Image (cartoon, grey):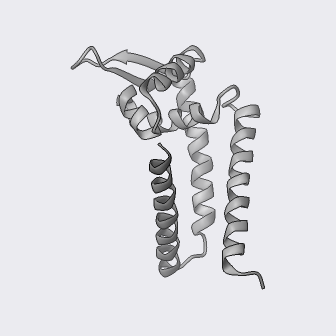
Amino acid sequence: MPKLSEMLNDLLVSAYNNILRIEEEFLQKGIGRGLSIREMHMIEYIGNSGKNGRTLSETADFMKVARPSVTISARKLEGKGFLSKNACEQDGRVTRATLTREGRKVYLHHMRWHTLMVRELENGLDEGEKNILIHAIEKLNSFFESNIEATT
């Protein structure tokens, strides 16, 4: 039997590649046609905020990219009809982004897929197994975050 480290590596690489393939197919053929993966993640982050949207600064911080990059992406998404940019009522210097009806459709479709994925993962696990899975993914995510910070 292969070592645990080899099995984990193979599973992680396979899961990563499958997620990429599914997202790319969704963005090439589905209702998200014409979106990049980064744009889809921006739509997802803004969609998670509800009707108030997000400021472009909040979005840049979350995505760990420069503010001008988010401004350019927001402009492209606005041109594609997925996003609306508005001056903040409290501070006109701040721009808030909200999803249009088309943006909301893409967001909801994408989130349904996430829901199915999570349900399939947790299906049949008892509480102890769920806690172990959460702990393992938290450790993996901490590793990713520490490596992102080390490279920026």
User: From what the image shows, is residue 149 above or below residue 55?
Assistant: below
In this image, 121 relative to 145: left or right? right
Taking the spot 67% from the left edge, 79% from the top edge, the residue there is 4
Residue farthest to the front, as pictured = 151
Along the line of sight, the residue nearer the viewer: 68 or 42: 68
User: From what the image shows, is residue 48 above or below residue 57?
Assistant: below
Residue farthest to the bottom, as pictured = 1
In this image, 23 relative to 152: left or right? right
Could you tell me residue 91's position as x and y percent? 23, 18
Residue 48 in view: no
Residue 96 in view: yes
Could you tell me residue 76's position as x and y percent? 57, 18
Could you tell me residue 51's position as x and y percent? 38, 30
Quadrant assignment for the N terminus: bottom right
Taking the spot 70% from the left edge, 60% from the top edge, the residue there is 13
In this image, 65 relative to 115: left or right? left
User: From what the image shows, is residue 11 above or below residue 65?
Assistant: below
Taking the spot 51% from the left edge, 33% from the top edge, the residue there is 42
Residue farthest to the left, as pictured = 90
Taking the spot 58% from the left edge, 51% from the top edge, the residue there is 114
Could you tell me residue 84's position as x and y percent? 46, 18
